[in-house]
Amino acid sequence: MSSSSDALFAALWTDYRALAPHAERIHALLGRDRAVPNDHVAFRGIGRPGVGIDALAEAFRLLGYEPRGEYVFEEKKLFARHFESREQKQPKVFISELLVEKLSPRSQRILEGLLAQIPLGISGGYGGSSGAREASEPTDALTLKRPLVLAGRPWSLTQAEYYELLEESEYAAWVAAFGFRVNHFTVAVHELGSFPSLQALNDLLEAEGFELNAAGGKIKGRPEIGLQQSSTLAPPVRVEFSDGPLEIPGVYYEFAWRHSVDGVLYSGFVTSSADRIFESTDARGRG
Ligand code: NI
């Protein structure tokens, strides 16, 4: 892996683990005597210029990543692409974006209100390597070479706005609350060499007290289609809103087992599985 690629993934892991102490505990559990192979990192964006898939992908394009598969999620009103590096053994990158025009006028107005807060000078440049963590940061933050994938939330919002979005789209509410940052890292369990199956890993995690996303079954996908996936349920984290903090689901850890299909290790994603993996950040309907 090139050093600039190492640096980006290290920065992403640092940003992610701040929201995911449980992922760090699992990482330590699995990596006791070896590195934990990373299958993919995922991001969520908004289908508008400067804040969608293209803008989030920019940092990876600069490292030689190229777009591969395309995925449509009708019901969740999302479009996604995955990117792969020309270099072998680099993690894949999965980036989705909200199809804003398919939402209700009310949700669209809330989102446009958030986008309008992105400071002048950033919004136009957000597709590149500049950006700021918070709208309120001084302008010298704009000079930092900070890609959108590490930008954080460049706006403020109220609890009511969050709940209104949540009613229509859990995804929209998550992006509104967290902005632009890692949604999940993914262990390539088949490369670990210490589990006979994804089920065996799930059993260990549950025995250790970690809660898994059961939407659509704890394991999504089948060996015959090339990919099996499971994930934790995103634990609640404290998020600041302009009228006070809320405890809401943050980020989750995913586990992938890739299989060979017709003699070739499957490298894509499975829409029906990803559709339910998205629900790992959904607090609605949890007991
Ligand atoms: Ni994923």
Image: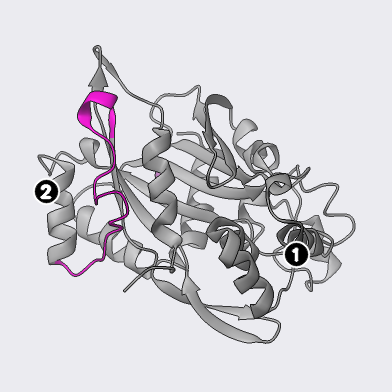
Q: Residue at x 46, y 55 (%)?
A: 13
In the rendered structure, does residue 243 fall within the stretch colored magenta? Answer: no
Q: Name the residue carrying label 1.
A: 110
Q: The N terminus is located in which quarter?
A: top left
Label 1's element?
helix
Type of residue at label 1? Answer: Ile
Vertical arrangement, residue 273 with respect to residue 86, above or below: below
Residue 235 screen position, x and y as percent? 38, 70
**What are the residue bounds of the magenta stretch?**
208-227
Name the amino acid, label 2: Ala
What residue is rendered at 85% in x and 66% in y?
A: 139
Q: In the drawing, does residue 88 fall left or right of residue 227?
A: right
Give 182 or 113, whichever is nearer the viewer.
113
The residue lying furthest to the bottom in this view is 244
- Look at mark 2 in the image and give the residue it sits on: 200
Q: Of callouts 1 and 2, which one flags the residue occurring earlier in the amino acid sequence?
A: 1
